[in-house]
Image: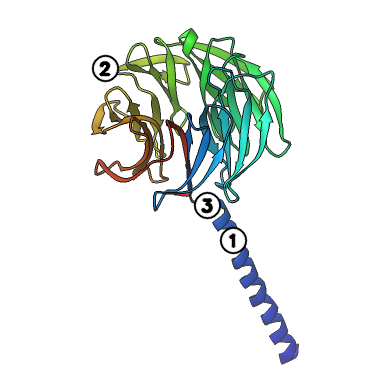
Amino acid sequence: MSKRAKFNVAFIIVFSIVIAWKNYIIVIGQTQKTVLVALNKDDATLAIIDPKEMKIIGKVPTGDSPHEVVLSADGKTAFVANYGAQTPGSSLSVIDIETKKELRRVDLSPLMRPHGLQEIGGKIYFTAETNRAIARYDPAANKVDWLMGTGQNASHMIVGTSDQKRFYTANIGSDSVTAFEFGKIPPAQSKVTHIAVGKQPEAIDLAPDGKEVWVGLNAENAIDIIDTAANKTIEKIKLGERPYRIKFTPDGKTVVATMPNAKELILFDAATRKETKRIKLESFPLGIVFSKDGKTAFVSVVQNDFVLKIDLEKSEITGKLETGKVPDGIAVAGV
């Protein structure tokens, strides 16, 4: 091979590597979009927030009384459950974060009162409280592609495993958690189990390893812990006040409960189930999400209405932002 030919081959290889690396950087940037969103129930808006600077970069109208929100894995799209106030809601708002616009409002009729949401594998799982059901929305196809009944009253919140094979709903009106187990991608080969828990279960989360579900009991001011292998309650933690939301940190080592009436966060060691810390606040905490390392919490609070950025290790509020009237549902990506 001539020197010129060798030079051309070398140039092509180097050029290809540069292009591949550039594309890799672009893809990485796309999958790590940094954004925080919070729903303002009384304003019927979604606030789009820069979580590092804690400043609002946009607001988008939603349906009536939006309660819960999730983000796509790349942080580019928000999905909002329009629960409704006096009139039951029956839609999901699909919102583009970059353009700060509602792309579409998905009519879920006859499914009513959509509430709990979870994004897994690009699909949006949600509860339809009035219908006593769970369902799945496929954004790519823009349709609800399956649904299953819980047979329980007020199926409010939902959590699921990353393989989309196990889901759990907190059923406020039936004092139960419904466990759905699928042999394949749902709803094929399904098994449904109703697990008896304490009075008025609402808050719920699944441990990252899938071994436990923690459930908040509104009428008992307590948490029930469910062993997912046995599908039964194995322990109760008394709190003294109602836990509005319960969330595992991403590493699964800590569980945090938002306690509106006490105006505080309670942190638990997930392994020992012992309380490790209480963080006092000046407002009533509702929704909570975490940074990837679990060291920072973003919390929606009411009376007064703010989203707080909290350093969990130092128990310090490091950011505070007024987003609108009655902020509740909250989600974060890329932090």
Marks 2 & 1, CB-CB < 8 Å contact: no
Q: Which mark is residue 26?
A: 1
The residue wearing badge 3 is 33
Q: The N terminus appears in which quarter of the rendering?
A: bottom right
Front one among 33 and 185:
33
Q: How is the protein colored in the picture?
A: rainbow
Q: Is residue 270 visible?
A: no
Decide if residue 298 is on the left or right side of residue 21: left
Task: Please name the amino acid that badge 3 sits on.
Answer: Lys
Front one among 141 and 274:
141
Q: How far is disc 2 from disc 1 in space, using C-alphas?
A: 49 Å
Q: Earlier in the sequence, mark 1 or mark 3?
A: 1
The residue wearing badge 2 is 240
Q: Which mark is residue 161?
A: none
Q: Earlier in the sequence, mark 2 or mark 3?
A: 3
Q: Position of residue 131 (x, y in %)?
A: 62, 14
Q: Secondary structure beneath disc 2?
A: loop
Q: Secondary structure beneath disc 1?
A: helix
Q: Position of residue 227 (x, y in %)?
A: 43, 20
Task: Please name the amino acid that badge 2 sits on.
Answer: Gly
Rendered view: 162 above or below 87: below
Q: Residues within 10 Å of mark 2 (few under 14, many from 20)?
A: few
Q: Residue furthest bottom?
A: 3
User: At 55% across and 57% down in the image, what residue appears?
Assistant: 29
Image label count: 3
Q: Position of residue 329 (x, y in %)?
A: 47, 32
